[in-house]
Image: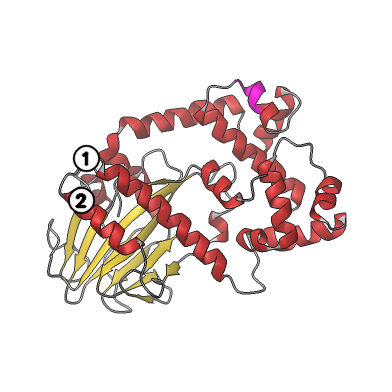
Amino acid sequence: MSLDTLSEVLRAVRLRGAVFYYVSGDDDWAAEAPAACDIAAAVMPGVEHVIEYHVVARGNCWAAVVGAQPVRMSVGDVVMFPQGDAHVMSSAPGLRADPIPKEWVVATARASKPIPVAYHGIGVPAGPEPDERASTVLVCGFLGCDLKPFNPLISALPRLMHLPAPAGGDWVAPVMHQAVRESRELRPGSEAVLERLSEMMFVDAVRRHLEALPPGSTGWLAGLRDRVVGKALTLMHDRPAEPWTIELLSERAGLSRSALHERFVHFVGQAPMQYLGRWRMQAAARQLVESHAPVASIALDVGYDSEAAFSRAFKRIVGMPPGEWRRRHRRGAGATAGSGAAAADVAV
């Protein structure tokens, strides 16, 4: 039995990374990024949800969701905006700038990666080349994932996730800094390296966030950490086709039916069988997009005895029949691939 439910969810929601901007800032500077949904189509075509992140490769700076309190960042720190909020990166707390124009993002979408940007003031990039003497250097990028039919992870993450560099150093900043340097030198395979590094960084960030959750926390991640709820989640994720009932789950989890229901709702926010139904649809949706398996075969794989029953459940939960989902999302995947790495892998 697999015990790594987090990895299973990350595979199912098709996490994928994007190449970076390489940002330098000097003097008093600020850069304000618009909400990710406003530029997602330009930076990662065909992706439902994008997460912006920044790694401090040199110096110090401040990061904030627009309208919220800023956090101070130092070398090796990572900040992520899992909900895709508009945010500000700046040399001092409280600085604001005009949001980066969408037109500028689109215009740079096909530029070589990473895209170098230099700031010497508030808001507007001062030039296309980074200032190698700048006091602050950031490596910035996007991660993409699916939200539909079901992504329990994203809603469990905060609007701003600040991961300080661990004491004694961290692999993230120096490795990504070196990867960007290799990419600027046009080394073969550098874009693929950057993509994989960004995915690794996100997984590491989520894991560290999970480990740092205070006692009494609720949400899907806190549920993973709970002995009983975590076991129930593992069972459903590892064997979604099993004919689970609340009675069988409670027996396997070692708790009464009513106690498991209450504990599961407390952490996850929905009943176990409701969660199972949504997870089955996510597992099915992934197969519909990534495989050529018949709908009837996919139905069996996720626990339905007939294609008709599965199709009714899929339409009820997802809002469209499985065949239509497959057609729509394969067209989107084709648009992403057809746009080329330059358009699909841009990051801000």
SS at badge 1 = loop
Picture layout, residue 115 above or below residue 314:
below
Quarter the C terminus occupies? bottom left
The magenta stretch is: 294-298
Residue at the (29%, 47%) spot, across then down: 346
Amino acid type indicated by mark 2: Glu
Q: Nearer the viewer, residue 119 or 267?
A: 267
Picture layout, residue 309 above or below residue 90:
above
281 on left or right of 194: right
Q: Place residue 187 in its image quadrant.
A: top left
Using a 10 Å C-alpha cutoff, classify the residue at mark 2 as few (fewer than 14 neighbours), some (14 to 19) or many (20 or more): some
Image location (x, y in percent) of residue 86: 38, 62
Can the viewer see residue 292 in this picture?
yes
Q: Earlier in the sequence, mark 1 or mark 2?
A: 2
Can the viewer see residue 319 in this picture?
no
Quarter the N terminus occupies? top right
Picture layout, residue 59 above or below residue 108:
below
Amino acid type indicated by mark 1: Pro
The residue that disc 1 covers is: 188
